[in-house]
Every structure is written in structure tokens, then in C-alpha cells.
Image: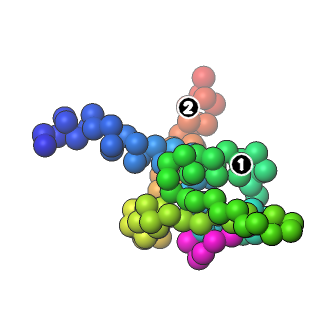
Amino acid sequence: MGRDEFVADCRVRAATDLFAHTWDPVVLAALASGPRRRRELRDAIGGISDKALTDAVHRLLTNGLIDRCAYAEAPPRVEYALTDLGRSLVDGPMKALGRWATEHGDKLLDAQEKSARNVIHAHARH
């Protein structure tokens, strides 16, 4: 496969889109330790609105990364869990990204702060 073909490959775009929504990887990471009920998931994440959690869960279900399991109990119980596909994403690329962030995160944040300072100074001169 040539380089240009790889860039235009819709599978690559679909995979990188999994990181386009801020909360999706966070929800996946929260499910890495095992199935959770919605309230447990929200408590484990912290700082996520109910709408953002609903949207993230919907996207992850649609992409086949998590399953929704409803139990016939009184009251009804619903749990969310990683699918094999979701587990492969968490244990593969997300774990690698986590290692990269640990190793290079300070440099990344420093560069962002430097860029922000340069923008502020450029506006102050005008």
C-alpha cells in the first residue's frame, strides 16, 4: 500500500475518529477494570455531564467498542462493558498513547504554553 493510499484509507480515518471526542477514551479507560453500571461509570470518571456520558456511551455502542447488558431484575440493572474490540483498543493504542503522554506530556504542555504566550505577546504589540 502506497503512502497516499494509507492517508486516504477510510479505516484509518475511522480509527482516528475514535479519539475525536474527548470523553470517549475516558469512558473506555473507566471500563478497563470491568463492567460498570451507569452511576458507577459516571462516579469513576468525575466531571462528566449526564449528556456527555449519554453521547459517549451511544458512540461507543455504535462503534462496537462497548456492550450494554440489561439484567431482568427488580429494579432493572444495566451494565456497560468493553467488547473484545474495545479491549483491543484500550490494551493497544490507548496504552501506547498513555506511555507516550507520560514520557512526552511535559514537553507537549510546555510547547502549548510557549505558543499561547507568543500569541498573547503578538496581540499586545498591535
Foreground mark, 2 or 1, reads 1
Residue 91: image x %, image y %?
43, 70
Q: Is residue 53 above or below residue 37?
A: above
CA neighbours of label 1 inside 10 A, class few (<14), some (14 to 19), many (20+): few
Can I make out residue 107 in this image? no
Q: Identity of the amino acid at label 2?
A: Ala
Q: Quadrant of the C terminus?
A: top right
Say which quarter of the image contains residue 78.
bottom right
Circle 2/circle 1 CB separation < 8 Å: no
What kind of element bears circle 1?
helix
Residue placed under numbered mark 1 in the picture: 54
Left or right? Give the position of 30 relative to 97: right
Nearer-the-camera pick, 32 or 4: 32
Left or right? Give the position of 89 relative to 80: left
Q: Residue at x 80, y 69 (%)?
A: 73
Nearer-the-camera pick, 119 or 68: 68
Q: Identity of the amino acid at label 1?
A: Thr
Residue placed under numbered mark 2 in the picture: 122
Q: Which residues are magenta?
A: 32-37
